[in-house]
Every structure is written in C-alpha cells, then in structure tokens.
Image (cartoon, rainbow, N blue to C red):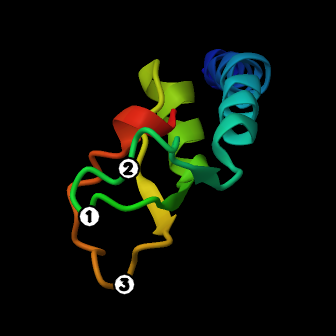
Amino acid sequence: MGQPWSLLVAIVVLALLYVAFPVFLLTYSRFRAARRLLSSLLCPQAREQASVTLDAFHAGLTDAFAGRPRLRVKRCSLWPEREGCGQKCLAFSG
C-alpha cells in the first residue's frame, strides 16, 4: 500500500521541479526590478511620475499555480502618503 503513495509523491515532486519551478523563476526574474512608469503614463490617482516595485514572489507563485501572474505593488515612490491606493498603475507597468 505504501508504493502507490510513494509514486504519487514522486510524480508531484517531478511536476514541481520541471514545470512549476521554472515558470516561477521566469516570472520572478521578469518582475523583480523596480519599474518607472512611462512618462506619458503617470500615477492614475496622484497624476505624478512614480517608480514602483512589484511583488515578484507573489507574481511567480500565482503564475506557476494559477496560470498567469497576479501583480501587486510592493513599494512605490509615492508611498507612504498614498499607500492605500487602488494600484491602477499596474495596468501600465507590466
């Protein structure tokens, strides 16, 4: 009875190593650097130029296990004054 569970665990581990982990790494490396919003695209709420850092770890996990990255701001040059913003800048920073 122990062998089927061992085989199932081995399959899951291989799937994580050869599918999910590479997807996570590619997405993480894509979103880890700070990004400056394009000069024509200012912060939608403040109407100012902003530099944002995305949560690359969260983007990598959601891409690996949900099929596409979910972006969220980790840091913004306009924070802490506007920290509760709706993060509509994400539509322009990808």
Gap in Å between the C-alphas at discs 2 and 1?
8 Å
Q: Residues within 10 Å of mark 3 (few under 14, many from 20)?
A: few
Would you place residue 92 above or below residue 50 in this image? Answer: above
Kind of residue at badge 3: Pro
Marks 2/1 in contact by CB < 8 Å: the verdict is yes
Q: Relative to the observer, which residue lies in front, 41 or 88?
A: 41
Residue 43, horizontal then vertical, whole percent? 34, 54
Q: Is 31 on the left-hand or right-hand side of 88?
A: right
Gap in Å between the C-alphas at discs 3 and 2?
17 Å
Would you place residue 92 above or below residue 53 in this image? Answer: above
Q: Nearer the viewer, mark 3 or mark 1?
A: 1
Quadrant position of residue 24: top right
Marks 3/1 in contact by CB < 8 Å: the verdict is no
- Residue matched to label 2: 42
Q: Residues within 10 Å of mark 2 (few under 14, many from 20)?
A: some
Q: Which quadrant holds the N terminus?
A: top right
Residue 53, horizontal then vertical, whole percent? 57, 58
Q: Relative to the observer, which residue lies in front, 75 or 11?
A: 75
Q: Is 37 on the left-hand or right-hand side of 22?
A: left
- Residue matched to label 3: 80
Would you place residue 10 above or below residue 52 in this image? Answer: above
Residue 92, horizontal then vertical, whole percent? 42, 35
Kind of residue at badge 2: Leu
The residue shown at (76%, 25%) is 22
Q: Residue pushed farthest front?
A: 40
The residue shown at (49%, 39%) is 93
The label number, if any, that marks residue 46 in the structure image: 1
Q: Secondary structure at mark 2?
A: loop
Sequence-earlier tag: 3 or 1: 1
The residue shown at (35%, 46%) is 89
Kind of residue at badge 1: Ala
Residue 88, horizontal then vertical, whole percent? 27, 45
